Image: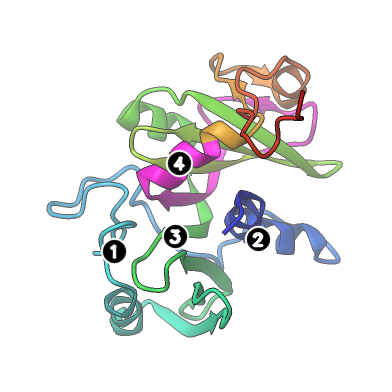
């Protein structure tokens, strides 16, 4: 699976939100979750409710989701040509919030979710330390989204910012996460344009107008013949 497609999956929920008539990245009808700031014995990050990317078998993960009384509307789709599988579900009495994907059709590769804005970036930093990288997108005049990277976990945290001029602070609301395999995180780091994390109390524009710390690593296929 090409990385561009992976990135589309990782950001799909937020793209859908951005395409809504009145785009809203924050909603109390999304997944109620604090796994990114809470220790659960036997399910350390990037484990989520007993599902660990790169470890948990796909069918076992589906059963975990089906058996969770707080989740509903599970749907799956298989690419017959590649045997890759995707799944999506919703918060009970809420909206579609979450996706899971398998690159090989057998084992979970990543989980991505849009969450209620109940937790703050400062809580994530207090728990895990400062992230290493970030990248962002403007959704509307008063909404922007940044993805902060924790390569060693491996985890992405999605954070709401009040438009291009909005500040990224310890009070910035977490609106989602992605838990990945380490191989997939490494792939993202070698194929993405990312800004280095330089601390809080900077605006979205400050970061997005800075130079990229990481740029895609050339591959043999991408290198022109001499």
Element type at mark 3: strand
Above or below for 130 versus 187: above
Residue at image x 28%, y 71%?
57
Contact? badges 1 and 2 (CB < 8 Å)? no
Element type at mark 2: helix
- Dot 1 corresponds to which residue? 51
Q: CA distance from mark 3 to mark 4?
A: 12 Å
Element type at mark 1: loop
Q: Is residue 212 left or right of residue 128?
A: right
Residue at image x 31%, y 78%?
68
- Mark toward the start of the polypeptide (1 vs 3): 1
Contact? badges 1 and 3 (CB < 8 Å)? yes
Contact? badges 3 and 2 (CB < 8 Å)? no
Q: Is residue 100 left or right of residue 202?
A: left
Q: Is residue 197 left or right of residue 5?
A: left
- Dot 3 corresponds to which residue? 111
Q: CA distance from mark 3 to mark 2?
A: 12 Å
- Mark toward the start of the polypeptide (1 vs 2): 2
| Range of residues picked out in magenta | 161-188
In which image quadrant can residue 77 be found?
A: bottom right
Q: Quadrant of the N terminus?
A: bottom right
Residue at image x 86%, y 66%?
21
Looking at the image, which is closer to me, 102 or 45? Answer: 102
Q: Position of residue 126 (x, y in %)?
A: 34, 27
The extreme left residue here reads: 41
- Dot 4 corresponds to which residue? 185
Q: CA distance from mark 1 to mark 4?
A: 17 Å
Contact? badges 3 and 4 (CB < 8 Å)? no
- Label 2: how many Cα within 10 Å (few below 14, some 14–19, many 20+): some
Q: Position of residue 169 (x, y in %)?
A: 57, 25
- Mark toward the start of the polypeptide (2 vs 4): 2
């Amino acid at each position: 699976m090409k990385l561009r497609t992976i990135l589309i999956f990782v950001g799909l929920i937020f793209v859908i939100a951005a395409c809504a008539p009145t785009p809203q990245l924050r909603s109390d009808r999304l997944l109620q979750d604090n796994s990114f700031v809470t220790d659960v014995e036997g399910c350390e990050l990037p484990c989520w409710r007993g599902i660990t990317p790169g470890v948990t078998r796909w069918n076992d993960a589906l059963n975990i989701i089906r058996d969770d009384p707080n989740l509903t509307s599970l749907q799956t789709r298989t690419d017959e040509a590649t045997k890759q599988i995707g799944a999506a579900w919703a918060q009970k009495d809420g909206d579609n919030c979450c996706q899971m994907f398998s690159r090989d059709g057998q084992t979970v590769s990543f989980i991505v979710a849009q969450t209620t804005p109940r937790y703050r970036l400062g809580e994530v930093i207090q728990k895990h330390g400062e992230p290493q990288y970030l990248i962002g997108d403007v959704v509307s005049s008063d909404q922007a989204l940044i993805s902060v990277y924790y390569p060693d976990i491996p985890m992405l945290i999605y954070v709401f910012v009040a438009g291009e001029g909005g500040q990224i602070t310890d009070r910035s609301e977490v609106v989602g996460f992605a838990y990945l395999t380490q191989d997939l995180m490494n792939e993202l780091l070698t194929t993405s344009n990312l800004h280095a994390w330089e601390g809080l109390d900077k605006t979205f524009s400050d970061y997005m107008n800075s130079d990229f710390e990481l740029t895609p690593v050339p591959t043999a296929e991408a290198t022109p013949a001499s």
